[in-house]
Image (cartoon, rainbow, N blue to C red):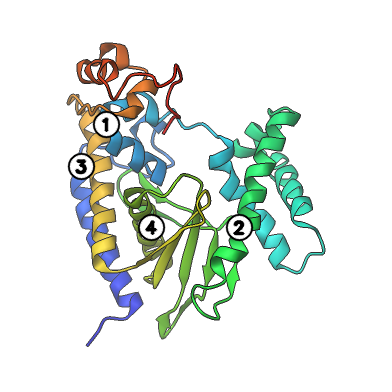
Amino acid sequence: MTATPRERATAWRDRARVELLAAAQPLPEGGYWSTPERQRVAIRSYDLREASACPARYLARGRDGFRWTAAIAAPTLARTALAELAGGSAATAPEAVWRALDQQAAEGTDLGDWLGGLGPGGRSAVARAVLAIVAAAPGQLHPWPPRARWYAERDRSPSWLLRGRPVRASAAYDLRAGRPRAGGDDSRLALFVGAAPDPARAELEAGHLALVATLDVGSVPVAVSVLHLQSGERTTFDVDDDLLGDALDRWIALVGVVAGALEGAPPDTRAGPHCHHCPRAADCIPGQAWLVGPAGRRRGGLLPEEP
């Protein structure tokens, strides 16, 4: 007999606990919030991308290197604006966008503090990025899935804590169709990605969101759709065991990077475009070799865009 979405989620919770605890043994015992920040492992899609690109750079910069940009902030702010518009507000899209910025700036969060520190030009740039999402979302979502009603849920950020070690996985989605039910699960999740289409990144984002949602809600969603705002392309992933298993493998690898650093093991170095923005590039032999090679040279006198 085929397992129900809730039975599958229970099995994945058990597997995640066992495999992550094995990888996290070098970490101090205790809860996530009661452990010093440098000894915690935050598993977000940002951390997964940074650590997979270069563990050494991630440890030198990535864990403290997160910086808000218009592209990163836009999906979170768009979620607030879309929730207002979906609720029957008479506001225009630009009005809803500016209200979302003002509301977030008044809340005292990291994002709010960043918004509060921007000048008029910076806030306008953020508003343009948010409006692009709000304008694109209805047209991208209309054909998929047929007759589905999408909901924008503000501050819907599933998370999961590993009991016994300071490890926390978190994600965020922008829209939901359907919902977990006692007899099954027809929920589909969608998230916005501002970057150009990249199959590897889309799979990472979808798998990470699917696994966090599975462990948090206790039911496996049907699918995750990644919406690429620059091109209008949409990539949809059925949430099967392969997608969840690959995501869990990435989590284990990230925990291993931090655990190894706490034990004094030298981290791996991997050269690539991220070397242009690495604080330890001057002392990194593979990074220096890449930077002076044909792939690493500045093009037209300009640095490549930061990944």
Q: Residue beneath label 1, please?
A: 55
The percent position of residue 90, horizontal first and vertical second, equals: 82, 64
Q: Quadrant of residue 269?
A: top left
Q: Which residue is mark 2?
A: 136
Q: Quadrant of the N terminus?
A: bottom left
Dots 4 and 1: beta carbons under 8 Å?
no
| Residue 204, image x, y percentages | 34, 51
Which circle marks residue 35 in the picture? none
What amino acid is found at the position of numbered circle 3 in the picture? Answer: Gln
State how far apart marks 3 and 1 are (Cα): 19 Å
* Residue highlighted by disc 4: 206
Residue 13 left/right relative to 88: left
Instruction: For marks 3 and 4, give the CA distance.
Output: 28 Å
Mark 3, secondary structure of its residue:
loop
Q: Earlier in the sequence, mark 4 or mark 1?
A: 1
Tell which of 112 and 177 is nearer to you: 177
Instruction: Report the residue marked by disc 3.
Output: 25
Q: On screen, 128 above or below 133?
A: above
- Between the residue at mark 1 and the residue at mark 2, the CA separation in whole angstroms equals 35 Å
Q: Amino acid at mark 1?
A: Pro
Q: Amino acid at mark 2?
A: Ala
Q: Are marks 3 and 1 in contact (CB under 8 Å)?
A: no
Disc 2 residue crowd, few under 14, some 14–19, many 20+, Cα 10 Å: some
The residue mark sitting in front, 2 or 3, is 2
Q: Of the two numbered discs 2 and 3 on the same chain, state the one appearing first in sequence.
A: 3
**Residue mark closest to the camera, 1 vs 2:** 2
C-alpha separation, residue under disc 2 versus residue under disc 3: 45 Å
